[in-house]
Image (cartoon, helix red, strand yellow):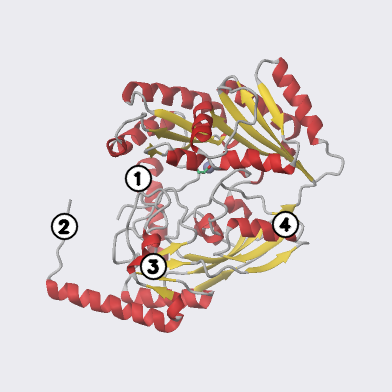
Amino acid sequence: MKISILPIAATARYNRSMDELVDRLRAILGHGGVLDEAGDIAPYGTDWRGLFDHRPRAVVRPADTAGVAAAVRLCAASGVAIVPQGGNTSMVGGAVPGTAGSQIVLSLARMNAIRTIDRSSLTLEIEAGVTLRAAQLAAEAAGAFLPLSISAEGSAQIGGVISTNAGGNNTLRFGNTRDLVLGLEVVLPDGRIWNGLRRLRKDNTGYALRHLFAGAEGTLGIITAAVLRLAPMPRSRIACFCGLPGIEAVLDLYRRLRDEDEAALYAFEYISGTALDLALRHLPGARLPLERAAAHYALVELATTRRAGDLGATFETVLGEALDAGSLDDAAIANSEAQRLAFWSLREHMADAQKRAGASIKNDVSVPVAAVPALLARAADMLAQHYPGARMDAFGHIGDGNIHLNVIQPEGADPARFETQGGELMERVNVIIADLGGSFSAEHGIGLLKRHAVTVWRGEVERDVMLRIKAAIDPAAIMNPGKIFEP
Ligand code: MLT
Ligand code: ZN
């Protein structure tokens, strides 16, 4: 490890200039716009998973785009790094400072206006600090549907959701977040505002800059507002919780439903038997929606905007065929909206159950859908060989080939000791993933946690192009440094 020690005079000078910067930020953003008391800023330095505790020097909370731009200009002039932060729900340390004590967190939480909803064009213009749940509700109130849903949607904010190009439960039908982004407003690292808030479905006028910022994890600028594509509100939605005898059976059911009515298949989620057992054990009030336990489960949602669409009949036909073929054990179709939501609540609390079950190593991987059985079998063998007793807590978006292949410490083992094996365990999973033509990060991004892997996975040419883009847009490297790339 390289340790650099600043002479005492230089340290004092540095602290003085940081104090001056905080004063100037306060002068433009007001008292409520800047936090620098230890107790106030601490939550902005830790992540949801509790992996990082990198306290920022201060937290700025601008109320509008002009405030963001002014804050960025001041930080840029002082060469101080900025960490954009939304709901701070990153699974990979994407929204906490890269190091302790010297970076400014810029929270978008106060920028939470729903600007406009256009029912004819089916677009929603919102500010970055609107939570995904609030955005869904705003669309719904206007009679439209925002086809984007993730487990953290109650806290995750739109700016962060776009910056990580989040996936989620509706990706198989509507694509990832970037596929819903028509326009963006971004504050660039030099403080200029790029107003790209277009609402066009067609716009072939050169580079699609919005796609650069979507998924850039805040390393190229700060997304302050967005225009999102909406969909017509489904007239009916129906969910089914299925118990299945094997992973091949899960894929068989997926293929049957897709081939029967692809347009109606809004979600096809996978929960392994182990993941469900952990949820029943650790989540208060959780219960199995079926009469008997199964080896694997799927939560399927069909939806349609058609008046005459009979989704119940589609389920009955396909589930009946799957039963006859021996690829389905049991199924419960939600008979009320409350039950549909209860099925979803179980799925959306999988990450909480994982957290409560002990120390765990999270792998958010994707492979071609057909390779999921091979992935799970090879991962189980690898764990049995190298980490006896460790529990494979797999769940995820199987219709996208995206499995959250989490590994939880053996019962009674020392959590800290298990965590030290994390890097090596992830590498072992990655060897399997590479062999199956997959990705080591399907929807959670890179952040601080996985940045070491970018060179290997993207290769030298791709990494070089990415670094050139970064250098062209953020030459002083002040925007969320340490994320995606190693410093
Ligand atoms: C989910 O699908 O529930 C989220 O991506 C969270 C997780 O992977 O733990
Ligand atoms: Zn997920």
Report the amino acid beneath label 1. Answer: Thr
Q: Which residue is mark 2?
A: 3
Q: Are marks 4 and 3 in contact (CB under 8 Å)?
A: no
Q: Position of residue 220 (x, y in %)?
A: 44, 62
Q: Are marks 2 and 3 in contact (CB under 8 Å)?
A: no
Separation of marks 1 and 3 at Cα, in angstroms? 37 Å
- Identify the residue at horizontal 46%, vertical 29% (top origin): 436
Say whether disc 2 or disc 4 marks the residue closer to the N-terminus: 2
Separation of marks 4 and 3 at Cα, in angstroms? 35 Å
Separation of marks 2 and 3 at Cα, in angstroms? 29 Å
Separation of marks 1 and 2 at Cα, in angstroms? 24 Å
Q: Are marks 1 and 2 in contact (CB under 8 Å)?
A: no
Separation of marks 1 and 4 at Cα, in angstroms? 42 Å
54 to the left or right of 191: left
Report the amino acid beneath label 4. Answer: Glu
Report the amino acid beneath label 3. Answer: Asp
Q: In this rendering, which labeled residue sits more in front, label 1 or label 3?
A: 3
Give above or below for 140 relative to 109.
above
Q: Which residue is mark 4?
A: 140
Of residues 299 and 359, the one nearer the viewer is 359
| Local secondary structure at mark 1 | helix
Which class describes the residues within 10 Å of circle 2: few (<14), some (14-19), or many (20+)? few
